[in-house]
Image: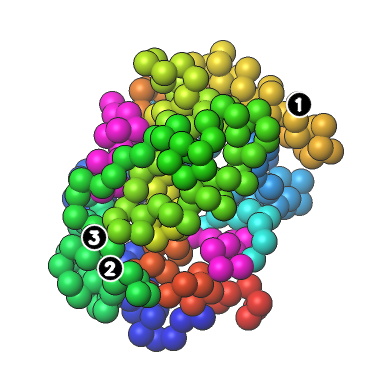
Amino acid sequence: MLGPSGLRRRSELMGALRAFFVARDYLEVDTPVRLPCLLPEAHIVAFSSDGWWLQPSPELCMKRLLARGCDRLFQICHCFRKEECGRLHQSEFCMLEWYCSGVDYLGLMAECEELLTSLSRTLIHFPSLQVSGQLQWQDKKIDLSPPWERLSVHDAFRRYTGMEVEEALARDLFEELLVSHIEPRLGQQGPVFLYDYPLALGSLARRSAARPKVAERFELYIAGVELANGFSELTDVKEQRRRFASEIAFLHSQGREAAMPERFLNDLEHMPASAGIALGVDRLFMLLSGVTDIRQAIPFPEETL
């Protein structure tokens, strides 16, 4: 729970985020948080709201705006997911999401790098950033200077588990090994982009032309904390419909509601080649504040309401 000084630092962070994107000619948008239909994603459990849904992400509406010709846009908003509350999770949380046409996931990695290095220079009330280009987090000194490490999922599994990623998927061990053996080791000296996820784990991401078994998706890690998730956008409507149908079938098999987002798919036909990313603002503020629990980084943790 934040007091006045923490709230002032959080406000400073919000201002710096907005300034970064406005300076790069991004359009700030605000979209509805309550929707009649969501993008079907089996790993996300949404809150119902009188027959509609609270958004787990602004992705659906922001992509529809991309299809209308808004080629660079960002949003800072609250999102809702049924997750266990704990050190890194709250069921209501603050998200920064941005999209840019004409770039792919590699270009987005570079821009994400620019964003965080810019914050490290411009934020002045964070004791953890007093050494230029360095984040002091607990007992760690994390070098923020670019270029940051790019580590493929394939190489991460070989390096940290001794198992091929294909075997982990076949034995249904991918998530377990990622969480227990890989994530805690990522970003301990400097930020790390974990990239090129198996295609089955990138339902809205474009298939790699050079490596057809992987999706052009990445996640950013700092101090073992997953901070952002981005990818080159899939704009092939037939392929997206096929993937959604698979997700919907699985959700129905679990007794969960899901429907084909037809209006989204209609707009997807007009969406340009682009890339998008979602970054957890609460987690970012937690890291910048030098604390280990997200409840120390937000104005009101759920148990205080």
Q: How far apart are marks 1 and 2 (CA)?
A: 46 Å
Q: In this view, does 11 lie above or below 225?
A: below
Hey, what amino acid is under mark 3?
Answer: Asp
Q: Is residue 149 above or below residue 245?
A: below
Left or right position of 54 against 130: right
Left or right position of 74 against 118: right
Hey, what amino acid is under mark 2?
Answer: Lys
Hey, what amino acid is under mark 1?
Answer: Ala
Q: Which of marks 1 and 2 is in front?
A: 2
Secondary structure of the residue carrying tag 1 is helix
Residue 51, given in percent of the width and then of the height, sits at 76, 46
Residue, disc 2: 141
> Which is nearer the N-term, disc 1 or disc 2?
2
Of residues 135 and 43, which is closer to you in this image? 135
Q: In which quarter of the image is residue 248?
A: top right
Residue in the picture at 43% in, 75% down? 291
Residue in the picture at 69% in, 47% down? 45
Residue, disc 3: 143
Residue, disc 1: 249
